[in-house]
Amino acid sequence: MNREFHTAEPFTVALCMHCSSSGPGPLLTRLLRNVVRRCPHGVLVSTQCLLGEFTCATRRTALRPVLVVQPCSADRIPSAPAIWIGPIVTDADAHDACSWVAAGRWDGANLPAHLRADVNLARVSSHN
């Protein structure tokens, strides 16, 4: 992860703690904490399932973390659509996701294809 530049743009990132207990989850949690510490207007929210219990239970892959990044104002007012990231399967995915958050250029199209949750979750649901 690029440690030299961290955005000054305000954001909130939500991380499902249920899915973050295995795989790259502990590393991801640590990396996200570091990103938020270095971003003056970054907030990390620990939450339960972001997808809802039914959706999460029907995923065909092992439970892996999914993030939601919400660009916002310094007053926490959303300023753009939320971006879903994941599932985060490997340590390299965790580093890529955190570098993307830290850069502050939040366009889902800039994420690697395997981290674009909008595409990945839609692909999985088409098999149900």
Image: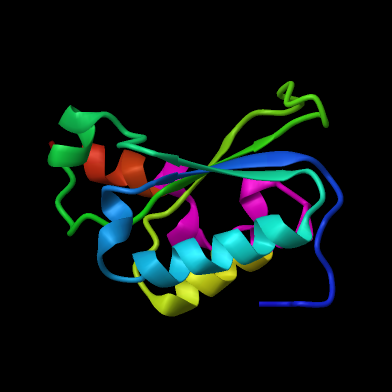
Counting the numbered discs, the total is: 0
Q: Is residue 44 left or right of residue 123?
A: right
Instruction: Give the residues in magenta.
Output: 100-119
Which quadrant would residue 98 be assigned to in this image?
Answer: bottom right
Q: Position of residue 40 (x, y in %)?
A: 82, 50
Q: Residue at x 22, y 55 (%)?
A: 63
Q: Position of residue 119 (x, y in %)?
A: 43, 45
Q: Residue at x 80, y 63 (%)?
A: 6
Q: Residue at x 14, y 51 (%)?
A: 60
Quarter occupied by the C terminus: top left
Quarter occupied by the N terminus: bottom right
Up/down of 28 relative to 123, above or below: below
Q: Position of residue 81 (x, y in %)?
A: 65, 28
Would residue 9 be counted in the magenta stretch? Answer: no
Q: Is residue 86 left or right of residue 58?
A: right
Would residue 103 be counted in the magenta stretch? Answer: yes
